[in-house]
Image (cartoon, rainbow, N blue to C red):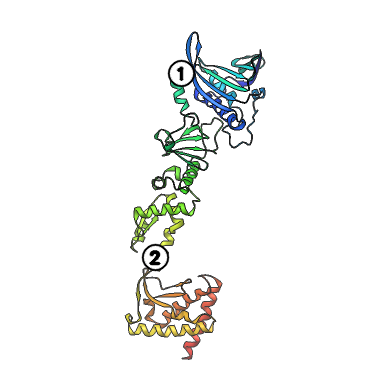
């Protein structure tokens, strides 16, 4: 028998206990199964100690052995493997150390043709208590690793095994499988975060549990740094797959933290959220973030609904922001007039300004028929004078501008000039100047 002293002080990771120790051993066994195809088996049984049955956890991998390099701090065979749970390569040593500190726990490892008996002992070389392994050879060779953890109470194992979804799988009906992981619906998994089936932490602010294939976890595997992004990504995948639509909308509406990172939804997913919003509040509802906007929208007969930030951003991407909707509503016509509804003076001012505009348009190589597409309206916003629709080629003119020919013509010219460019552009300003110059010349020649 040969003893190997590790440079691992006995008191390292003082916060680790039974679960953390078992977690590391199971995690390594699981990684061996994924990496090497070494089938894993984890079971609870009893061994005899002092002629009494003692609870024992057996962790077995068929088809692999552990090299002695595993005694070295820093040794790992997992570099660059995103499909493995562990990444530091030190879980076996740390897990065994944590378990050996627990009174009554003993560990034996059958590895190939050797037996490894880990222990905590005094190192004269380091003048400290360290983790060590007594290695004895001479057994019959088996391409297998089996770790026995003797001294575990059955009630402790009952709690521990629930933290591994690949040991105690949840009921199929309580799992929503999506690309990149699973959403766990059962009440006992509420707020629990798993990474590749291994429990990491609980976030009590979450409504569901989540098992992700990718996560940034700390060395102790007790904390996930990106919980909200994980839950949001998996929920977004569920929504895109047509799953949990009503529940996800409720989570968004209730400002659940697990939806705070739901950005970049596809058009179909956004459409689902919009449909549920409209079903709840009506087709004329507009999402807003403050009471003043509710009042402003109410002036136009539209319902403003205060919703949480993430939900509002999703809805705004389809329905437009409150600012955009207010601008649109202000430009909407409350009433459209036929010519016979105008006073004689208004009809005269309209006809005269229309003829001047037509001639000015023709002189500046703009379509003269634009003058025939002028609609007299009352805007929802009484301060608005006119609008131009590029798609329809129509000009809406506020009726109050017909009190004078100059007022009507000024608005007509401004809106017609939008054919050349938007407000503030050089093209728009030049078109206004050219049309105005021509109009002045025509009026002075009369």
Q: Is residue 17 visible?
A: no
Q: Secondary structure at mark 1?
A: loop
In the rendered image of this protein, does residue 403 appear above or below residue 268? below
Tell me which residue sits at (39%, 68%) in the image: 332
In the rendered image of this protein, does residue 315 appear above or below residue 14? below
Counting from the top left corner in percent of width and height, residue 173 is at: 42, 37
- Specify which label sits upstream in the sequence, 2 or 1: 1
Q: Residues within 10 Å of mark 1 (few under 14, many from 20)?
A: few
Q: Is residue 191 left or right of residue 116?
A: left
What numbered label is drawn on residue 329? 2
Front one among 361 and 47: 47
| Residue topped by disc 1 | 153
Q: Are marks 2 and 1 in contact (CB under 8 Å)?
A: no
Count the marks: 2
The answer to which image quadrant residue 300 occupies is bottom left
Q: From the viewer's perspective, is the residue at label 2 or at label 1 nearer?
A: 1
In the rendered image of this protein, does residue 3 appear above or below residue 191? above
Front one among 226 and 39: 39
Q: Is residue 321 visible?
A: yes
Q: Secondary structure at mark 2?
A: helix
């Amino acid at each position: 028998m040969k003893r190997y002293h590790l440079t691992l002080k006995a008191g390292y990771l003082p916060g680790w206990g039974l679960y953390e120790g078992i977690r590391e051993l199971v995690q390594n066994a699981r990684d061996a199964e994924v990496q090497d195809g070494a089938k894993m088996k984890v079971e609870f049984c009893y061994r005899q100690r002092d002629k009494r049955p003692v609870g024992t956890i057996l962790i077995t991998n068929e088809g692999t052995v552990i090299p002695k390099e595993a005694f070295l701090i820093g040794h790992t065979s997992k570099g660059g493997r995103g499909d493995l749970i562990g990444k530091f390569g030190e879980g076996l040593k740390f897990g065994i150390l944590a378990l050996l500190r627990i009174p009554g726990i003993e560990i034996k490892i059958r590895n190939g043709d050797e037996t490894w008996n880990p222990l905590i002992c005094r190192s004269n070389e380091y003048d400290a208590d360290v983790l060590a392994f007594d290695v004895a050879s001479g057994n019959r060779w088996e391409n297998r690793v089996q770790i026995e953890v003797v001294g575990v109470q059955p009630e402790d194992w009952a709690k521990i095994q629930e933290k591994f979804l690949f040991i105690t799988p949840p009921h199929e009906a309580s799992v929503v499988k999506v690309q990149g992981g699973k959403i766990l619906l059962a009440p006992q998994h509420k707020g629990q975060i798993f990474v590749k089936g291994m429990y990491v932490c609980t976030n009590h602010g979450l409504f569901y549990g989540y098992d992700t294939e990718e996560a940034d976890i700390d060395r102790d595997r007790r904390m996930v740094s990106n919980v909200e992004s994980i839950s949001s990504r998996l929920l977004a995948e569920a929504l895109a797959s047509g799953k949990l639509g009503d529940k996800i909308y409720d989570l968004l509406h209730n400002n659940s933290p697990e939806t705070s990172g739901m950005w970049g939804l596809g058009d179909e997913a956004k459409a689902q959220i919009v449909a549920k919003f409209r079903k709840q509040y009506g087709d004329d509802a507009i999402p807003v973030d403050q009471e003043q906007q509710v009042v402003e929208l109410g002036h136009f007969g539209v319902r403003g609904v205060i919703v949480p930030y993430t939900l509002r951003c999703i809805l705004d991407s389809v329905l437009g922001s409150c600012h955009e909707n207010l601008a649109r509503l202000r430009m909407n016509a409350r009433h459209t007039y036929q010519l016979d509804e105008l006073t004689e003076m208004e009809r005269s001012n309209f006809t005269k300004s229309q003829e001047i505009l037509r001639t000015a348009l023709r002189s500046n190589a703009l379509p003269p028929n634009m003058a025939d597409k002028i609609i007299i309206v009352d805007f929802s916003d009484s301060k608005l004078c006119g609008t131009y629709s590029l798609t329809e080629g129509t000009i809406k003119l506020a009726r109050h501008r017909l009190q004078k020919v100059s007022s009507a013509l000024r608005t007509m010219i401004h809106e017609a000039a939008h054919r050349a460019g938007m407000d503030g552009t050089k093209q728009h300003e030049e078109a206004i100047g050219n049309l105005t110059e021509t109009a002045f010349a025509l009026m002075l020649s009369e």
